[in-house]
Amino acid sequence: KESKLGNSPLRNLFACCSSSPCDEDVVFANKVVGFWALILGTALGPPLLKMLGMAKALFATGLFMMLTNIAFAGLATAGDNVAVLAGVVGLENFASGAGLAVFTTYISGICNVRFSGTHYALLSSLAVIGRTFVAASGGYVATEVGWVWFFLITTAAALPGMALLYILWQRGYTGEAVRPSTERKQSIPVWQMVTLCVLIAAVLASIAWRYV
């Protein structure tokens, strides 16, 4: 999630939206709900890839990650609402986990087997350019336009990447040529379903423990 322009410090956002922000609430949302949502999303990535195929899974998770920025725009208008904070953070981490799992599989597949270490290092380094050089300006942009417009702008900033991904999809450059085709729908193994159920239960238990 750190690679996204929209991920400015969460505590600063909540401080601006709340009259009496509580660090404990932010830690709970980010480190408890966010952590389990990230694990759940990462676990869901492989079965999603198996069901949809590489191209559709890349597009679906990319679109999901883009739309979570709109949820943060809603959080900016929600005020002092810890439940909304936890829900938005959980949604964003879930999307990031699924997207990361699919994207890692994609760049692993397009690497040449003989030089996989070098190719993967180069591709993964290119993937964090946005976090390194662009995200640093996020605070200045948020100060100038406000949090709502900031997250709407970051949503729009993802559109060129989604358009490029669609072009690559249509031209067949989405990885199927270097791995067995996954376009055919397959059943999800029982152990994966059990793992997902356990993770979902853990997320719900964490939320219940905080509010009950």
Image (cartoon, rainbow, N blue to C red):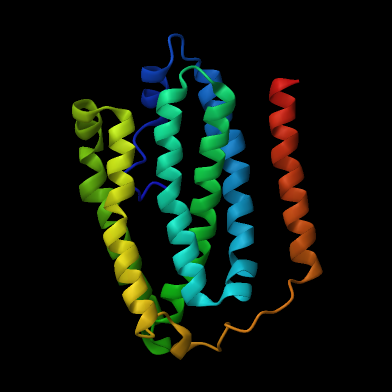
Front residue of 11 and 71: 71
Q: Quadrant of the C terminus?
A: top right
Left or right of 180, for residue 149 = left
Q: Can residue 77 be seen from the camera position used here?
A: yes
Left or right of 144, for residue 98 = right
Q: Residue at x 54, y 58 (%)?
A: 98
The x and y percentages for residue 114 are 40, 89
* 154 w.r.t. 164: above or below: above
The x and y percentages for residue 205 are 75, 35
Q: Residue at x 69, y 31 (%)?
A: 207
Left or right of 160, for residue 165 = right
User: Which corner quadrant of the image does residue 119 belong to?
Assistant: bottom left
Q: Residue at x 51, y 67 (%)?
A: 102
* 140 w.r.t. 173: above or below: above
Left or right of 175, for residue 130 = left
Farthest-out residue, top: 20
Task: Tell me how many marks there are.
Answer: 0
The x and y percentages for residue 154 are 30, 45
Q: Can residue 118 be seen from the camera position used here?
A: no
Front residue of 164 and 33: 164
The x and y percentages for residue 162 are 34, 63
* 1 w.r.t. 74: above or below: below
Q: Residue at x 58, y 63 (%)?
A: 45
Front residue of 33 and 174: 174
